[in-house]
Image (cartoon, rainbow, N blue to C red):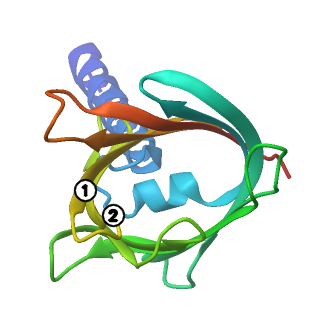
């Protein structure tokens, strides 16, 4: 074997080894186009620090717990959220089911809670680069009008920040109604 052929074989072996290392690390990295990633990010039990707003001013705080359970197929998740009563607020309980709807080609959430008079349906979009889910919904105000809402959920590892804004026709900009900082329980 000549010195040059030995060097060529070493170079080829090195390239093959480097390619396999790159390929294995790419396989371990989450796929940003994975439509079920946001569901997996939300799975688990989360402690919630809740802040309520009126006219852009903080009007109260509460603590709660959300338990999010993935269905066996990994395509849908259930949310159960409870906030015990405080001196200022009655107890709250909400329940939702959401996932990626292949017919609608978007995320769909159905939500019911102790504050609403009807079922709320939200439609969402996942921004993988920002690790953010944005939801839109229209909810009856009980007086024959529909109100538009925008919910944003930012995933930051073991923390999620969920905000609710109302989109009003009278005001030019959305205004903040609710901010929840969720912290995932370990174990």
Whether residue 139 is situated above or below residue 110 in the rendered picture: above
Determine the image quadrant of residue 120.
bottom left
Whether residue 172 is situated above or below residue 17 in the rendered picture: above
SS assignment at label 2? loop
Q: Position of residue 78 (x, y in %)?
A: 56, 74
- Front residue (pair 55, 124): 55
Label 1 packing within 10 angstroms: few (<14), some (14-19), many (20+):
some
Given the current orientation, which residue lies at the most extreme front position? 143
Residue at coordinates 21% horizontally, 64% vertically from top-left? 145
Q: Using the rendered image of the protein, determine whether residue 79 is visible from the camera's viewpoint.
A: no
Q: Which mark is residue 147?
A: 1
SS assignment at label 1? strand
In this image, 9 relative to 92: left or right? left
Comparing marks 2 and 1, which lies closer to the viewer? 2
- Please say if the residues under marks 2 and 1 sit with CB atoms less than 8 Å apart: yes
Whether residue 35 is situated above or below residue 120 in the rendered picture: above
In this image, 185 relative to 44: left or right? right
Number of numbered tags placed on the structure image: 2
Q: Which mark is residue 103?
A: none
Whether residue 26 is situated above or below residue 93 in the rendered picture: above
Q: Earlier in the sequence, mark 2 or mark 1?
A: 2
Give how far apart the Cα atoms at labels 2 and 1 are.
7 Å
Q: Which mark is residue 141?
A: 2
In this image, 127 relative to 30: left or right? left
Residue at coordinates 15% horizontally, 83% vertically from top-left? 103
Image quadrant occupied by the N terminus: top left
Q: Position of residue 59 (x, y in %)?
A: 61, 29
Determine the image quadrant of residue 42.
bottom right
Label 2 packing within 10 angstroms: few (<14), some (14-19), many (20+):
few
Q: Position of residue 60 (x, y in %)?
A: 67, 32
């Amino acid at each position: 074997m000549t010195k040059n052929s030995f060097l060529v074989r070493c170079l080829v072996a090195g390239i093959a080894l480097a390619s396999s290392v790159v390929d294995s690390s790419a396989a371990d990295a989450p796929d940003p186009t994975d439509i079920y990633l946001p569901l997996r990010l939300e799975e688990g039990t989360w402690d919630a620090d809740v802040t309520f707003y009126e006219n852009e001013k903080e009007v109260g705080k509460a603590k709660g717990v959300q338990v999010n359970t993935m269905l066996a197929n990994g395509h849908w998740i259930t949310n159960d959220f409870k906030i015990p009563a405080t001196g200022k607020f009655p107890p709250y309980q909400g329940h939702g089911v959401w996932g990626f709807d292949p017919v609608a080609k978007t995320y769909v959430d159905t939500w019911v809670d102790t504050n609403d008079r009807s079922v709320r349906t939200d439609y969402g979009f996942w921004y993988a680069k920002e690790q953010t889910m944005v939801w839109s919904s229209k909810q009856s105000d009980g007086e024959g009008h529909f109100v538009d809402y925008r919910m944003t959920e930012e995933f930051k590892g073991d923390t999620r920040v969920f905000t609710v804004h109302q989109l009003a026709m009278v005001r030019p900009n959305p205004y903040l109604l609710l901010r929840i900082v969720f912290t995932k329980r370990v174990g």
